[in-house]
Image: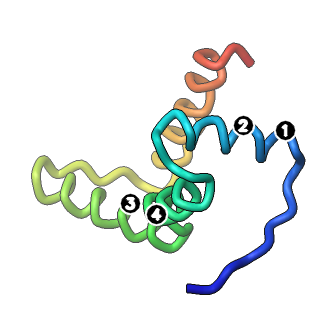
């Protein structure tokens, strides 16, 4: 296993260390676990395509690209409202 140095603000490091400690992990172990759980953009795109295919097979749901953009805009709007933005 190789080590890496990552430069982040001290406040971010302290926050991550506190989260890790609350879960009984070292900061190193917490970051390694976090990296294993996050998806790359390519992995997210692949899962989205799989979900679209599953929905189309299950109930025929297949929005057009314009429909997807509209749905994305609506989701962004609702998330903005929920987040108080």
Tag 3, which secondary structure?
Answer: helix
Q: Residue 48 carries which label?
A: 3
User: Which of the 4 image quarters holds residue 31?
Assistant: bottom right
Compare residues 30 and 84 and report the one nearer the observer: 30
Horizontal arrangement in the rendering, residue 81 relative to residue 54 (left or right): right
For the residues bearing labels 2 and 1, Cβ distance under 8 angstroms: yes
For the residues bearing labels 2 and 3, Cβ distance under 8 angstroms: no
Tag 4 residue = 44
In the image, residue 70 above or below residue 54? above
User: Which of the 4 image quarters holds residue 21?
Assistant: top right
Horizontal arrangement in the rendering, residue 8 relative to residue 40 (left or right): right
- Disc 2 versus disc 3: distance between alpha carbons? 31 Å
Q: Quadrant of the N terminus?
A: bottom right
Tag 1 residue = 11
Q: Which of marks 2 and 3 is in front?
A: 2
In the image, residue 3 above or below residue 60? below
**Mark closest to the chain's N terminus, 1 or 4:** 1
Compare residues 67 and 26 and report the one nearer the observer: 26
Compare residues 56 and 42 and report the one nearer the observer: 42
**What colour scheme governs how the chains and residues are painted in the rendered image of this protein?**
rainbow
| Residue name at image x 17 percent, y 51 percent | 60
Tag 2 residue = 15
In the image, residue 76 above or below residue 55? above
- Disc 1 versus disc 3: distance between alpha carbons? 34 Å
């Amino acid at each position: 296993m190789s080590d890496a140095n990552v430069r982040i603000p001290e406040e971010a490091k302290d926050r991550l260390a506190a989260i890790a400690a609350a879960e009984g992990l070292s900061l190193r172990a917490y970051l390694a676990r976090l990296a294993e759980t996050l998806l790359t953009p390519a992995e997210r795109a692949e899962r989205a395509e799989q979900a679209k295919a599953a929905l189309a097979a299950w109930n025929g749901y297949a929005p057009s690209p314009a429909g997807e953009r509209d749905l994305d805009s609506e989701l962004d709007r609702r998330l903005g409202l929920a987040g108080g933005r």
